[in-house]
Amino acid sequence: MSVALETKNVYENFEVETDILFFKVGSLGMVSFHGRNYNIKKRMSAEQLKSMIAKACFVQVKSDCYVNLGKISAIENDLLYFGSELGDGKTIPVTKRKQAMIRELLKHKQ
């Protein structure tokens, strides 16, 4: 029983900047957070969402999707890869234009 409570605590108390690979904004303030091996849906106020989007680590790649620049492991074949190996982690399809923008941001970040 205590193991289940500890696991639940991790899901409720995640750090957006360090734990989240990307998030998608849905209707009525519902945000879907995607971590390495989990997805969490959470309702957020407009102010909370604005402050999260304003952080420099997140970049908009689609109208409803923001990625964490620090968690991107590769950009290949029109996909952003998150994870240590290309076949191991999560991916998001992106346009060539967004790929170029992200490459520039990553270059300046280093």
Image: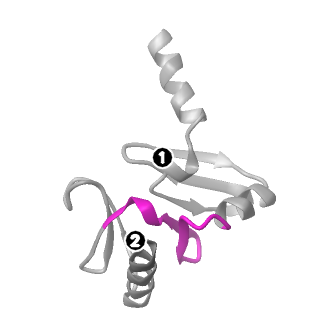
- Residue at the far bottom in the pictured view: 97
Q: Quadrant of residue 91?
A: bottom left
Secondary structure of residue under mark 2:
loop
Please give left or right for residue 36 compared with residue 86 in the image.
right
- 14 vs 52, left or right, is left
Q: Residue at x 42, y 84 (%)?
A: 104
Q: Quadrant of residue 29?
A: bottom right
| Within-10-Å neighbours for mark 1: few <14, some 14–19, many 20+ | some
- Locate residue 63, reporting x and y percent: 58, 77
Q: Residue at x 63, y 62 (%)?
A: 26
Q: Which residue is mark 2?
A: 110
User: Is 109 included in the stretch rendered in magenta?
Assistant: no
Residue 43 in the image: state x and y as whole percent.
Answer: 70, 48
Q: Residue at x 50, y 20 (%)?
A: 6
Q: Which residues are magenta?
A: 54-73
Look at the image and name its color scheme. one colour
Of callouts 2 and 1, the N-terminal one: 1
Which dot marks residue 95? none
Q: Quadrant of residue 90?
A: bottom left
What's the CA distance linking mark 2 and mark 1?
A: 20 Å
Q: Is residue 90 above or below residue 16?
A: below
Q: Amino acid at mark 1?
A: Asp
Q: Are marks 2 and 1 in contact (CB under 8 Å)?
A: no
Task: Decide: few, some or many residues near mark 2? Use Cα within 10 Å; few <14, some 14-19, many ≥20.
Answer: few
Q: Nearer the viewer, residue 62 or 84?
A: 84
Q: Of the residues tagged 2 and 1, which is closer to the observer?
A: 2
| Residue 19: mark | 1
Up the image or down, 104 lies above or below 110; here it is below
**Amino acid type shown at disc 2:** Gln
Image position, residue 19 (x, y; %): 48, 46
